[in-house]
Amino acid sequence: MRKWLIKQINKIGLDSSHLKTDAELKGRFLEAGESEKIIFPMELDINSEWRIKEWFFEKGQIVNPGDIIGAVENEKQRFEFESFIGGKLNYFKQVGQKVEGGSVLAEIAGS
């Protein structure tokens, strides 16, 4: 939705560079020793098989609040997820791996 809106704003000649997502506005950076897990939402795990499609960051890279870090897909939909926290991408499931509601997709650690 956000990408579509930005395209529409740019199409009519307005500047969209100052727009921020909730994650960018409300997110925070983890302190050293802290870590957070990114969990696949239970609401998406209804009569469908979801798999990791791709990661936009590599293990060990720093992510910022608001970064889109990966995507999961089923046969009909794609779900890209953004991070509400900043830190080092410490762990993530492999591309092609099946995911279920409540399972850990990735972990971000403070640095």
Image (cartoon, rainbow, N blue to C red):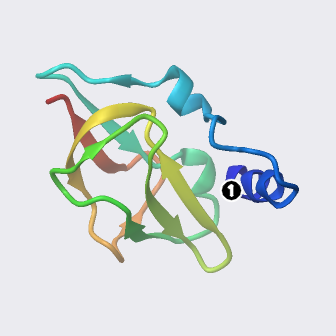
Query: Under tag 1, what secondary structure?
Result: helix
At 26% from the left and 43% from the top, the residue drawn is: 107
Extreme-right residue of the structure: 12
Q: Quadrant of the C terminus?
A: top left
Tell me where residue 51 appears, x and y as whole percent.
Answer: 44, 71
**Quick check: 43 above or below 76?**
above
**Quick check: 94 above or below 59?**
below
The answer to whether residue 76 is left or right of residue 101 is right
Tell me where residue 50 appears, x and y as whole percent.
Answer: 50, 68
**Quick check: 107 above or below 10?**
above
At 65% from the left and 70% from the top, the residue drawn is: 77
Front residue (pair 71, 51): 71
Tell me where residue 30 appears, x and y as whole percent.
Answer: 26, 24
Q: Where, by quadrant of the figure, is residue 34 drawn?
A: top left
Tell me where residue 37 appears, x and y as whole percent.
Answer: 31, 38
The image shows a total of numbered marks equal to: 1
Q: Amino acid at mark 1?
A: Lys
Task: Return the residue at label 1.
Answer: 3
Question: Mark 1 packing: few (<14 Cα in 10 Å), some, or many (20+)?
Answer: few
